[in-house]
Image: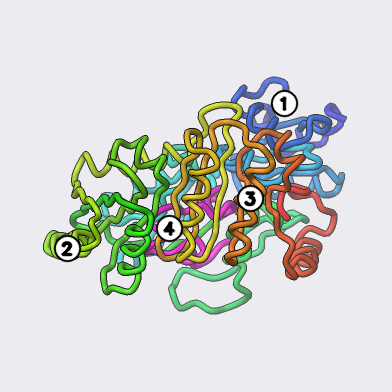
């Protein structure tokens, strides 16, 4: 079959962009090994140089009923469910151009393969930025961030990826291009495919371009770190939510995170303000005054110390260290977040780290040693009892085979299946990766 695929794809792909699987980089192999069943490893890694080549590749694959797993640089390729079949891994990493940058309108349209790091570098001279801070920020592509709905701590002020996208285009199962949205904030034409593709995990089509709204780079930044007893931190969190303060990032963190980052003892709450210096000073003073009344310890940091703190926080919770590392995403009603953080700390006090966003209740966690199924079931059950969810992102196949990564059993499943059938009638895009 490998030679048959090669002979048909060589008409549209040059040999450097049609890479036999046995010759690909070991990093790619390791990621695919975690997400694709051993019995159906891919035949080729494909890296189209332009959109037309991508379209033709999809047409040929569709005509021959070859399964496809879309990705960018592959940094999140092993997230989510196990792919049941994967003839081709199709990477958009070479589709990395800026299509249009309307500086005065604070919008930009880019190809899906551009990395967030390169995009931020392009925006910085114009004093603009895209407020997302995903896992693996150096390697993550815009298409991959969109497909996994991976935004990070800036969600507190700017919302998730779906709140920043104004329009997108994608390659359908038949190789044709479909578009939605536009380049202006108030564009309302067509269906809201932007939200549908946010978190679709490459199961509906291959994202080709994305249009974002941008924001000015804040003039200054400062972070207040608070540590104390769980009940006191919980009260502090409720007070902040009811106040008029406007942090750009606010994370409740487990005691293990506080300890690992050498921030003190107990539960933690890390709040970041980014605005003009006067506003940061005033809001930080208000937070510290409230914390003092609750007997909560505070530390204020800025500049390099602040940057290092947020970088270390991301790396501690979201970056895999070993083959036995498990990372996941948690959602829970905000007033129950502290209880969940205490639960994961009690169950695995030395090998688990977690943080949950103050206002949305969306968070991330990492377990450094392969956990028991009982631990995972307890954590998922507590989330679901409080109108939430627990999703396994990165883990060994053995875990994902025993513990369903998504855990969703709601009444939207029939609708999800209908949408999948409409967008991918032959089930060729990332089969079984999503719910």
The residue sitting at 48% across, 57% down in the picture is: 339
* First of labels 2, 3 by sequence position: 2
What kind of element bears circle 1?
helix
- Left or right: where does residue 186 sit relative to residue 9? left
What kind of element bears circle 2?
helix
The residues bearing labels 1 and 4 have C-alpha atoms spaced at a distance of 39 Å
Q: Quadrant of residue 322?
A: top right
- Residue at the spot of label 2: 289
Q: Quadrant of residue 263?
A: top left
The residues bearing labels 2 and 3 have C-alpha atoms spaced at a distance of 37 Å
Which of the labelled discs sits on residue 378, or is there none?
Answer: 3
| Eye-nearest disc, 1 or 3 | 3
Magenta region: 142-168
What kind of element bears circle 3?
helix
Which of the labelled discs sits on residue 21, or is there none?
Answer: 1
Rendering coords of residue 208 (x, y %): 59, 53
| Eye-nearest disc, 1 or 4 | 4
Rendering coords of residue 122 (x, y %): 34, 48
* First of labels 4, 2 by sequence position: 2
The residue sitting at 66% across, 63% down in the picture is: 178
Crowdedness near tag 4: few (<14), some (14–19) or many (≥20) residues, C-alpha within 10 Å: many
Crowdedness near tag 1: few (<14), some (14–19) or many (≥20) residues, C-alpha within 10 Å: some
| Eye-nearest disc, 3 or 4 | 3
| In the foreground, 269 or 210 | 269
* First of labels 1, 4 by sequence position: 1
In the rendered image, the quadrant that contains the C terminus is bottom right
The residue sitting at 19% across, 49% down in the picture is: 300
| In the foreground, 23 or 293 | 293
């Amino acid at each position: 079959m490998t030679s048959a695929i090669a002979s048909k794809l060589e008409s549209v792909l040059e040999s450097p962009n049609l890479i036999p699987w046995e010759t690909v980089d070991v990093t790619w192999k390791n990621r695919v090994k975690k997400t694709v069943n051993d019995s159906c490893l891919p035949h080729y890694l494909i890296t189209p140089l332009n959109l037309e080549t991508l379209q033709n590749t999809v047409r040929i694959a569709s005509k021959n009923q070859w399964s496809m797993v879309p990705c960018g640089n592959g940094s999140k390729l092993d997230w989510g469910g196990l792919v049941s079949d994967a003839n081709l891994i199709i990477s958009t990493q070479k589709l990395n151009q800026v299509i249009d940058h309307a500086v005065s309108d604070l919008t930009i349209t880019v190809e899906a393969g551009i990395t967030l790091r390169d995009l931020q570098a392009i925006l910085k001279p114009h004093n603009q930025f895209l407020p997302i801070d995903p896992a693996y920020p150096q390697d993550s592509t815009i298409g991959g961030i969109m497909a996994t709905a991976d935004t990070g701590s800036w969600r507190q002020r700017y919302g998730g990826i779906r709140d920043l996208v104004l329009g997108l285009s994608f390659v359908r199962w038949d190789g044709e291009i479909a578009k939605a949205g536009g380049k202006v904030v108030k564009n309302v034409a067509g269906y809201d495919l932007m939200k549908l593709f946010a978190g679709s995990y490459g199961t509906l089509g291959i994202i080709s371009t994305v249009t974002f709204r941008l924001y000015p780079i804040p003039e200054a930044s400062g972070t207040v770190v608070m540590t104390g007893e769980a009940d006191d931190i919980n009260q502090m969190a409720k007070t902040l939510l009811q106040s008029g303060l406007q942090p750009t990032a606010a994370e409740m963190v487990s005691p293990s995170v506080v300890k690992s980052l050498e921030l003190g003892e107990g539960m933690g709450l890390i709040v970041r303000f980014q605005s003009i210096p006067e506003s940061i000073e005033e809001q930080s003073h208000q937070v510290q005054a409230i914390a003092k009344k609750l007997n909560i310890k505070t530390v204020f940091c800025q500049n390099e110390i602040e940057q290092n703190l947020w970088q270390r926080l991301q790396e501690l919770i979201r970056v895999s260290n070993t083959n036995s590392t498990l990372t996941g995403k948690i959602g829970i009603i905000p007033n129950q977040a502290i209880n969940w953080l205490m639960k994961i700390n009690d169950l695995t006090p030395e090998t688990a780290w977690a943080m949950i966003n103050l206002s949305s209740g969306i968070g991330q966690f990492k377990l450094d040693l392969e956990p028991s199924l009982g631990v995972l079931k307890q954590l998922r059950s507590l989330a679901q009892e409080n109108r939430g969810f627990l999703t396994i992102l990165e883990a060994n196949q053995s875990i994902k085979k025993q513990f369903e990564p998504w855990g969703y059993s709601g009444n939207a499943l029939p609708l999800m299946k209908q949408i999948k059938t409409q967008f991918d009638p032959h089930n060729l895009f990332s089969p079984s990766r999503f719910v």
